[in-house]
Amino acid sequence: QVQLVESGGGLVQAGDSLRLSCAASGRYAMGWFRQAPGKEREFVAAISRSGGLTNYADSVKGRFTISRDNAKNTVYLQMNSLKPEDTAVYYCAATTRRQVGSETSREYDYWGQGTQVTVSS
């Protein structure tokens, strides 16, 4: 059973930064997704099992950075220049079927509990 524990959410002002962490019980290709109230869950960023490949949603490209520390089995999402529209519950996800992260939520087998990010204007 894969366990994912997220941390790092909070309330910030527009333009501020936050870093989310997701500690996993092993090394997997990982993704970050988010879900705002009344909206569907959407892809944010993904990283390969090795860390060598990353991809981002257009809405966060240039502002967010996904990275990983394989010694700690932890994946990070550095979020800079936050906007009110980034407000959502952020989830990390792990896939045991792929070496490279995916933009599709159904490709992931395990999900974290979610962490709230609120950006005020």
Image (cartoon, grey):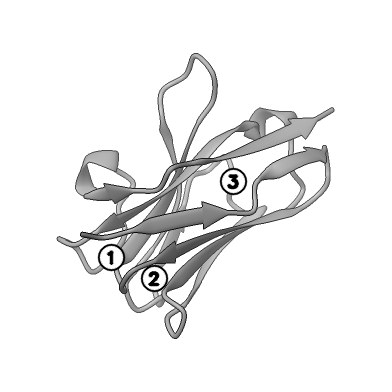
In the figure, 18 relative to 82: above or below? below
Residue of label 2: 53
Q: Locate residue 100: give its quadrant.
A: bottom left
Q: Which mark is residue 100?
A: 1
Quarter that holds the N terminus = bottom left
Pointer 1 and pointer 2: residues touching (CB < 8 Å)?
yes
Bin the neighbour count of mark 1 within 10 Å (Cα to Cα): few under 14, some 14-19, many 20 and up: many
Where residue 117 appears, x then y in whole percent?
A: 65, 38
The extreme left residue here reads 97
**Of callouts 1 and 2, which one flags the residue occurring earlier in the amino acid sequence?**
2
Mark 2: which amino acid?
Answer: Leu
- Relative placement, left or right, of 55 versus 36 is left
Query: Could you say whether the residue bearing mark 3 is in a helix, strand or loop?
Result: loop
Query: Could you say whether the residue bearing mark 1 is in a helix, strand or loop?
Result: loop
Residue of label 3: 60
Q: Locate residue 64: give its quadrant.
A: bottom right
Q: Residue at x 52, y 43 (%)?
A: 58
**Of callouts 2 and 3, which one flags the residue occurring earlier in the amino acid sequence?**
2
Where residue 77 appears, x then y in whole percent?
A: 57, 58
- Cα separation, mark 2 vs mark 3, equals 16 Å
**Of callouts 3 and 1, which one flags the residue occurring earlier in the amino acid sequence?**
3
- Cα separation, mark 1 vs mark 2, equals 7 Å
Q: Locate residue 12: give its quadrant.
A: top right
Mark 3: which amino acid?
Answer: Val
Query: Could you say whether the residue bearing mark 2 is in a helix, strand or loop?
Result: loop
Q: Residue at x 55, y 64 (%)?
A: 76
